[in-house]
Image (cartoon, grey):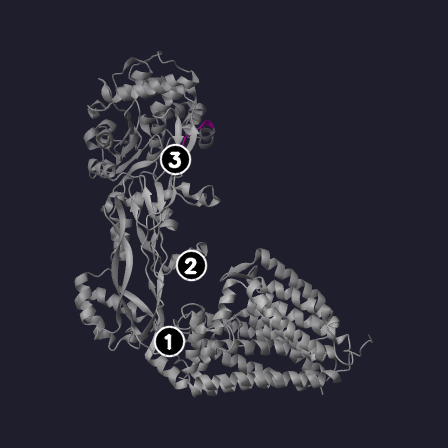
């Protein structure tokens, strides 16, 4: 091949001409097509664009149903009718809005605000102006649809919670996807096709199982005329065919909750604040989960203004807070069962060994009081749990030392999240980002923490921690899990809320089995002694919860009272103590004690006394549950 | 004559003016498309245009022959960037096209188009064609040069850009004299390869688009939707259009992507056949001015480079408008100087700059 002269361009010149002609020819072809579209058939297209507009209408998919362990429906769906306004379709927008005002009986200011919002919206985009209108109002709008041409009705499938506020925290509620969240949701879950106004689970099961519960929306191609009325025949083949793609409902979930137990607990709670959790010790299934006060989740699918929502958020009794998981408390004397078991296992005391309780305990220059000023005299471990003697456990705590106490508490799952709802992640790293209702970890002090914090002495903290005070913080669910383990010779099951996931038709997709997460090594004697002592608490003279005895069943438990503020900060006179400074009342229980089927933990905020406020609630739950078990057999 | 006068006399103001005019019409159309919904895009585009024009003018003042030395390094840099996209790219709408470089998001597939043109120009300028044209064997290195970036872009997947690289390369090869026999063989092998590519290489969504192109009414809700809406928008413009800012089909909900891939339908709706005629005439003028620049170039490198850059722009115009008026499948190719987007505007302005530079240098040596 000969080397070319890079400056000899003659051979290119003629071919460049061909390139120009080729391109010009192609552009001419485009022009010809444009002539065909815009001139030859232009009138047809203009007519179509003037008379008809077509759009894709979404068909809202129902969420999966939520059922209790016996198949009772807890959360269903209902159609909700919303009214939308498209400005471009109006003949006289102001008149139409006035008409709507009289139908929906808006106040003047409400009307002003809504009209302003509508008028700020793009001409051709429809905007929701009223949510959840009644059948009656709907009929009025429909009747006058000829004059109200800017108004459209949209049906949306929304949640219907059958038991009002009973399951507010554990099942949660649904909200609407807002503009603020939309971007984030789309990025995180591109496959779920979130759109503005979609229902989305906000807390509880609705939120953590969103992926199962969410259905997929259907769509339909609708041709509408200038006034937004659907056109059924367009004489264009493509628009007259059926283009509907149906909506697909989400999967239904069968939860481990027991409807009757939950309702019983609610009745027993009355209007006190607090939380209760019931577990099946043999499987870890959550039978009931209550947090009070709560709200009616149906509120959030109805018309709810930002002002109303803020008022709820700012209520001083914090109805949105899940007190069963999202809040932690000092465990108080319910901690003593654990201390007793640890002391026996570590060999620092024997079952027969007793300490003298004169009503106070002196260490160094400080004095710790027993809750009974006159003292309990000589008490051994069983007696100490029964009467909840503080002095006995001050001694035990010092003998154990803070770090051994810490180790035992951790073994029993205290200060460790239950990770409720995580069974669905099956070890995916995603799990760490999800906390069921902002579950708290709790806290168990150890010596290095005392050294770092520096505001107590090691011995002081140890003595306080021995009766569940000091730095100790636990969630009610953790206490229930600890109690369940005592009833199950140290076996720890992962607390679990969902039993099965089914397709809308009922076909099983997955059944979730119980998961043994840990086995605490306990001597059989230790277990037996603790259970026996718990039984004594409820059944024997001087037991702290004798009032909550159940004649038909043998059951056991442990009361607790945890300080909200230091005793020295409270007024001397009992009658003058303000509500917020009253002690929290706690109770943990197991029934039947020989072969436990249910473990409960109850806290009543500012309930003053575990035996009087918390134990009766636990008793009511246990009775209801066991009675039905017997009846079923 | 002093230096500044010389520059201003020799500078190709005509071509630059034509580009500025098209860019102006483009901005006007973009404003109409987004003023109701996302006006911020218009202001962003305004700054892209300013940047682009500066790049084009500055590039026009440089001696394009330095590009000859840069051709291979630039080509390999582009390949490297394409590889990076594969691993670290940001994805949008299901395909990985973007590379984040601090504040700037770069689309290496845009650079790949220029890189291929540069390397081909260098290749052909150093070799004289055999008297009866290039045979297939002579072109093997050319095929490799084109195929590697093309396949990488295709895998992103970005069918449109891959097609653009192929078409531009084909124009350059045609310019450089192909044997008649090779041309026929190429045509035949293309025709046999097409069905194989369709069934084996294309992704399902791409196959969908091709099927929809052959029968747009097959899936009016999905892929056909764009095509039909776009045709209604253009068609309803009739002879004189609905008037500026008066388009209804292209506003908001009816026509998707009305500020990027489907901006010409918005223009056609508001300005009608007359407007479309003017814009197509301007692009035709650009073809002739561009080819004229190539013909007057003093060296082969400049000549091939000019035709390459020109066909890069013009193929975009033809394929984009073709898909908007329903004669080509919807492949996601933007309309130069009209569509919203920084990366492709800068690429087009670089190409314009090269053409200006070739034009300017014809007076110098």
In which quadrant of the rendered view does residue A619 lie?
top left
Callout 2: 10 Å neighbours few (<14), some, many (20+)? some
Q: Are marks 2 and 3 in contact (CB under 8 Å)?
A: no
In the rendered image of this protein, does residue B76 appear above or below residue A355?
below
Q: CA distance from mark 3 to mark 1?
A: 57 Å
Q: Which residue is mark 2?
A: A183
In which quadrant of the rendered view does residue A15 lie?
bottom right
Residue at the location (42% across, 16% down)?
Answer: A348
Q: CA distance from mark 2 to mark 1?
A: 37 Å
**Label 3 chain ID:** A
Observer able to see residue B57: no
Q: Which residue is mark 3?
A: A514
Query: How far from the left and from the top, in percent, is residue B261?
Result: 49, 72
In the rendered image of this protein, does residue B22 appear above or below residue B40?
below
**Label 1 chain ID:** A
Which range of residues does the magenta coloring cover?
Answer: A441-447
Mark 2 / mark 3, whichever is N-terminal: 2
Mark 3 / mark 1, whichever is N-terminal: 1
Q: Which residue is mark 1?
A: A237
Find out whether residue B38 is within the magenta segment.
no
Callout 3: 10 Å neighbours few (<14), some, many (20+)? some
Residue at the location (80% across, 77% down)?
Answer: A4
Mark 2 / mark 1, whichever is N-terminal: 2
Q: Nearer the viewer, residue A116 or B143?
A: B143
Instruction: Please tell me whether mark 2 sits on a helix, a strand or a loop.
Output: helix
User: For this view, does A27 lie left or right of residue A342?
Assistant: right
Observer able to see residue A598: yes
């Amino acid at each position: 091949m000969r080397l070319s002269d890079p400056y000899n361009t003659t051979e290119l010149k003629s071919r460049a001409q061909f390139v120009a002609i080729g391109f010009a020819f192609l552009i001419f072809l485009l022009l010809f097509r444009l002539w065909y579209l815009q001139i030859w058939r232009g009138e047809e297209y203009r007519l179509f664009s003037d008379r008809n507009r077509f759009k894709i209408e979404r068909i809202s998919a129902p969420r999966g149903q939520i059922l209790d362990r016996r198949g009772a429906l807890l959360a269903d769906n209902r159609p909700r009718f919303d009214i939308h306004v498209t400005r471009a379709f109006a003949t006289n927008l102001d008149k139409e809005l006035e008409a709507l005002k009289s139908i929906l009986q808006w106040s003047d200011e409400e009307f002003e605000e809504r009209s302003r919002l509508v008028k700020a919206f793009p001409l051709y985009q429809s905007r929701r102006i009223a949510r959840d209108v009644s059948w009656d109002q709907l009929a009025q709008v429909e009747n006058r649809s000829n004059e109200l041409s800017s108004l459209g009705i949209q049906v949306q499938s929304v949640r219907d919670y059958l038991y009002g506020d009973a399951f507010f925290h554990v099942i949660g509620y649904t909200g609407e996807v807002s503009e603020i969240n939309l971007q984030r949701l789309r990025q995180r879950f591109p496959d779920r096709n979130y759109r503005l106004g979609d229902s989305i689970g906000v807390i509880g099961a609705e939120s953590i199982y969103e992926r199962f519960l969410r259905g997929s929306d259907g769509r339909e191609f609708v041709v509408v005329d200038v006034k937004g009325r659907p056109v059924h025949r367009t004489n264009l083949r493509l628009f007259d065919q059926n283009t509907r793609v149906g909506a697909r409902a989400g999967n239904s979930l069968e939860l481990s909750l027991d409807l009757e137990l939950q309702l019983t607990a609610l009745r027993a709670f009355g209007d006190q604040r607090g939380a209760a959790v019931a577990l099946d010790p043999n499987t870890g299934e959550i039978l009931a989960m209550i947090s009070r006060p709560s709200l009616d989740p149906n509120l959030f699918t109805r018309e709810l203004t930002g002002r109303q929502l803020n008022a709820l958020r700012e209520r001083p009794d914090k109805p949105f807070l899940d007190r069963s998981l999202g809040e932690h408390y000092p465990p108080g004397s319910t901690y003593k069962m654990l201390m007793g078991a640890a002391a026996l296992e570590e060999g620092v005391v024997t079952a027969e060994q007793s300490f003298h309780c004169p009503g106070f305990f002196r260490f160094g220059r400080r004095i710790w009081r027993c809750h009974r000023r006159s003292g309990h005299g000589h008490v051994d471990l069983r007696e100490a749990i029964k009467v909840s003697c503080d002095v006995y456990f001050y001694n035990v705590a010092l003998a154990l030392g803070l770090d051994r106490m810490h180790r035992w508490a951790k073994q029993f799952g205290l200060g460790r999240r239950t990770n409720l709802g995580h069974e669905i992640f099956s070890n995916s790293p995603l799990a760490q980002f999800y906390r069921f209702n902002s579950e708290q970890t709790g806290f168990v002090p150890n010596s290095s923490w005392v050294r770092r914090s520096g505001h107590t002495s090691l011995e002081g903290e140890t003595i306080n921690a021995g009766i569940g005070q000091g730095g100790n913080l636990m969630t009610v669910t953790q206490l229930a899990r600890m109690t369940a383990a005592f009833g199950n010779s140290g076996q720890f099951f992962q607390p679990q809320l969902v039993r099965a996931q089914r397709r809308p038709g009922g076909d099983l997709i997955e059944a979730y089995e119980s998961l043994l997460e840990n086995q605490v090594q306990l001597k059989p004697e230790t277990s037996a002694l603790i259970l026996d002592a718990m039984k004594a608490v409820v059944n024997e003279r001087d037991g702290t919860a004798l009032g909550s005895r159940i004649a038909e069943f043998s059951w056991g438990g442990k009361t607790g009272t945890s300080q909200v503020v230091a005793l020295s900060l409270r007024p001397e006179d009992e009658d003058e103590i303000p509500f917020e400074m009253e002690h929290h009342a706690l109770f943990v229980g197991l029934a039947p004690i020989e072969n436990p089927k249910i473990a409960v933990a109850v806290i009543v905020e500012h309930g003053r006394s575990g035996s009087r406020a918390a134990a009766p609630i636990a008793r009511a739950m246990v009775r209801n549950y066991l009675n039905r078990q017997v009846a079923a057999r | 004559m002093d230096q500044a006068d010389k520059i201003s006399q020799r500078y190709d103001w005509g071509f630059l003016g034509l580009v500025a005019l098209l860019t102006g019409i483009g901005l006007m159309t973009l404003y109409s498309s987004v003023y109701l919904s996302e006006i911020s895009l218009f202001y962003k585009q305004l700054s892209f245009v300013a940047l682009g024009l500066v790049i084009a003018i500055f590039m026009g003042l440089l001696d394009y022959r330095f590009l000859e030395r840069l051709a291979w390094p630039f080509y390999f840099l582009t390949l490297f960037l394409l590889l990076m996209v594969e691993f670290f790219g940001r994805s949008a709408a299901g395909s990985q096209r973007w590379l984040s470089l601090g504040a700037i998001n770069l689309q290496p597939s845009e650079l790949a188009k220029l890189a291929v043109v540069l390397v081909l120009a260098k290749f052909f300028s150093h070799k004289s064609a055999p008297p009866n044209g290039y045979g297939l064997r002579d072109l093997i290195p050319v095929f490799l040069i084109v195929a590697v970036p093309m396949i990488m872009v295709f895998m992103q997947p970005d069918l449109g850009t891959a097609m653009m690289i192929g078409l531009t390369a084909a124009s350059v090869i045609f310019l450089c004299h192909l044997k008649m026999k090779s041309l026929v063989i190429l045509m035949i092998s293309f025709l046999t390869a097409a069905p194989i590519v369709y069934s084996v290489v294309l992704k399902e969504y791409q196959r969908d688009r091709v099927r929809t192109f052959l029968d747009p009414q097959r899936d009016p809700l999905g892929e056909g939707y764009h095509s039909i809406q776009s045709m209604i928008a253009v068609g309803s413009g009739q002879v004189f259009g609905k008037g500026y800012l008066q388009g209804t089909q292209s506003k908001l909900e009816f026509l998707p992507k009305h500020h990027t891939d489907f901006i010409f339908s918005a223009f056609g709706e508001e300005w009608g056949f007359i407007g479309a005629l003017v814009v197509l005439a301007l692009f035709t003028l650009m073809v002739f001015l561009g080819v004229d620049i190539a013909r007057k170039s003093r060296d082969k490198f400049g000549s091939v480079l000019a035709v390459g850059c020109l066909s890069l722009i013009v193929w975009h115009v033809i394929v984009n408008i073709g898909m908007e008026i329903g004669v080509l499948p919807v492949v996601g190719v933007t309309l130069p100087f009209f569509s919203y987007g920084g990366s492709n505007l800068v690429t087009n302005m670089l190409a314009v700059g090269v053409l200006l530079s070739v034009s300017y240098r014809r007076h110098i040596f």
